[in-house]
Image: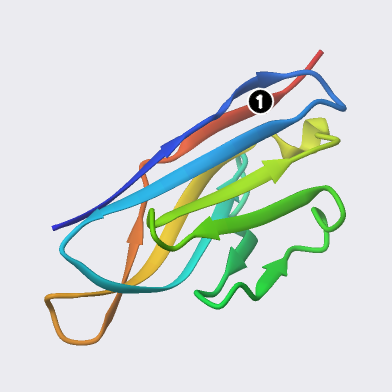
Amino acid sequence: QVQLVESGGGLVQPGGSLRLSCAASGNIISINVMGWYRQAPGKQRELVADITSGGSANYADSVKGRFTISRDNAKKTVYVQMNSLKPEDTAVYYCYATIRGTSPGLTNYWGQGTQVTVSS
């Protein structure tokens, strides 16, 4: 069984910063891509950023220059540092990871989601 556990969400004022973390645990052989999606009320889930095991990162245009994704492979953890937050960044943020476990092939796993609210 594989689990992704997120932490770090909360309420922040516009222009503020938050750091989200997501740790993977369980029967894991290797982790390919790790990343973050978000879903605002009434909107579809969208990619925020993701990062390969080799450190190659990909960002949504809306967060480029403000968010930085990183990962610690030894800790099986992915982070996203979110700076210059805007009200439109308000959403539930979901961690995901593409994992090779005891089952054949790669499987996508999701965290439970953490709320980020940007408001004065």
Q: Which one is nearer the viewer's eye here, 95 or 29?
A: 29
- Image quadrant for the C terminus? top right
- Position above or below: 73 against 56: above
Q: Which one is nearer the viewer's eye here, 70 or 46?
A: 70
Q: Which one is nearer the viewer's eye here, 46 or 54?
A: 54
Residue sitting at the far bottom: 105
Look at mark 1 in the image and give the residue it sits on.
Answer: 117
- Position above or below: 29 against 3: below
Please indicate whether residue 59 sits to the left or right of residue 103 in the image. Answer: right
The amino acid sitting under disc 1 is Thr
Q: Which one is nearer the viewer's eye here, 87 or 41?
A: 87
Colour pattern: rainbow
Q: Secondary structure at mark 1?
A: strand
Counting every numbered tag in the picture gives 1
Q: Quadrant of residue 50?
A: bottom right
At 44% from the left and 40% from the top, the residue drawn is 113
Image x and y of residue 17, in percent: 75, 30
- Position above or below: 83 against 58: above
At 58% from the left and 46% from the top, the residue drawn is 39
Please indicate whether residue 63 sits to the left or right of residue 106 in the image. Answer: right
- Image quadrant for the N terminus? bottom left
- Position above or below: 27 against 18: below
Image x and y of residue 66, in percent: 83, 48
Please indicate whether residue 70 sits to the left or right of residue 67 in the image. Answer: left
Q: Quadrant of residue 42?
A: top right
